[in-house]
Amino acid sequence: MRSELLLIIVGMGIVTYLPRWLPLAFLSRRPLPPWLIEWLDFIPAAVLSALILPAVMTTGEPRRIDLMNPALWVSLPTLFFALRTKSLAGTVLAGMGMYWLISLLT
Amino acid sequence: MNRRERQKAIREGMAAAWPICLGYIAIGLAFGVIARRMGLSLLEIGLMSLLVYAGSAQFIAVSMLGAGAGFLPVVTTTFSVNLRHLLMSSTLSLHLNRLAPGWTALFAYGVTDESFAVNMDRFSRGGWGWRQALAVNHTTNLVWIMSTVAGGIGGQFIPAGAFGIDYALIAMFISLLVFQLRGRLHVLVAAISGLLAVAIAVVLPGNYYILAASLISASAGLALSRVERLRPDKQGKP
């Protein structure tokens, strides 16, 4: 293995690990103020939405809004399916099936 | 907790990881193919997946390496791409108090967008402990490492996008988002965050949009819940 690449990979590992570890190491050791707990309670919904919408509504580099992205049009019935069934497994399989179907048709 | 209970907890964690594994197989194979094309050996691919374990950062890093970038640009870019995990680990810390430092350190290694989403869902529903969560993190990590190396060996012979596997993680995120929408404020926060993320994503390169949109929208949610509590008709109620 090339030693410069090894050094880069180790460096990448360290800077990736620190943001993952620091909050767990320090926040979990003490009681958090109520406002912070309430704020953190919104984070999962916020993060998930921030992951999903740009992934299905934008394409290209630099990114631009693309309303013809097939993932966007599959996401609407997938969202409806998730709201109706509240089933993770069902939603994943239904979403994949619809996405596959669209990719076969286009 | 006796041995049988511990094994049961680990099995529960592994079972909960399957949608993530599906997605990681698809992305991992694709990463292996590209990394191989950029001149990384199988050992280097496996080592990067083991030591870094972050999909989007690894894709960006190999394309930068392919373009001849050196230590500093690759490592600083990786840092900025993965800074968002700060927020996820902070949120997870609510459920991992009193965990021994060694286990915490091992758990932290496996915090990804996907394991965060699955574990937060399970923690909030109850009956979920650090052993289950740790099993989610490390099952998915193992699948990631194996998929990237497999992609480096023969990923180009596997048809891309079969069975809609490319959509597995988005479908999982949509389902987990629905589980998180526990009230009007959560719906509002998700709507603000998603639209803001799209707006930032088309203006700024990189993926700061995840961190920025989440911070702003969660703060808006907190502010709105405070304002609601101050309204005279709600006074006295928690």
Image (tube, coloured by chain):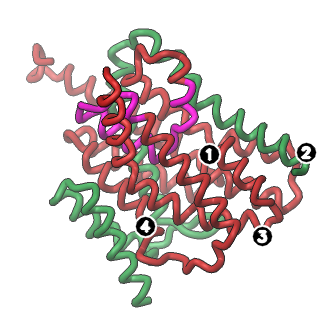
Chain colours: A green, B red
Cβ–Cβ under 8 Å for marks 1 and 4: no
- Residue at position x 35%, y 29% in the image: B6
Q: Quick check: marks 1 and 3 in contact, CB under 8 Å? A: no
Q: Is residue A5 left or right of residue A40?
A: right
Identity, as a three-letter code, of the amino acid under mark 3: Arg
User: Magenta stretch: dominant SS?
Assistant: helix
**Quick one: A50 or B162, which is closer to the camera?**
B162
Q: SS class of the residue under badge 1? A: loop
Query: In the rendered view, would you say B202 is above or below B51?
Result: below
State which chain disc 2 sits on: A
Judging from the image, mark 1 belongs to the subunit labelled B
Write down the residue under mark 3: B37
Above or below for A36 versus A6: above
Which residue is tagged 1? B53
The residues bearing labels 1 and 4 have C-alpha atoms spaced at a distance of: 20 Å
Q: CA distance from mark 4 to mark 3?
A: 24 Å
- In whole angstroms, how far apart are the C-alphas of marks 2 and 1? 20 Å
Please say whether residue B220 is visible from this viewpoint.
Answer: no
Q: Mark 2 and mark 4: span between their CA atoms?
A: 37 Å
Q: Mark 2 — residue?
A: A3
Q: Quadrant of residue B186?
A: top left
Q: Is residue A84 magenta?
A: no
Asked if marks 4 and 3 fall on the same chain, the answer is yes
Tell me how far mark 3 sits from mark 2, CA to CA: 20 Å
The residue segment tinted magenta is: B105-133
Crowd around label 1: few <14 · some 14–19 · many ≥20 (10 Å): many
The crowd level at tag 3 (other Cα within 10 Å; few <14, some 14-19, many 20+) is some
Q: Which mark is residue B167?
A: 4
The amino acid pointed to by label 1 is Tyr
Indicate the position of residue B96 as horizontal and vertical percent values: 41, 22
Taking depth in this image into account, of A25 and B218 the one nearest to the observer is A25
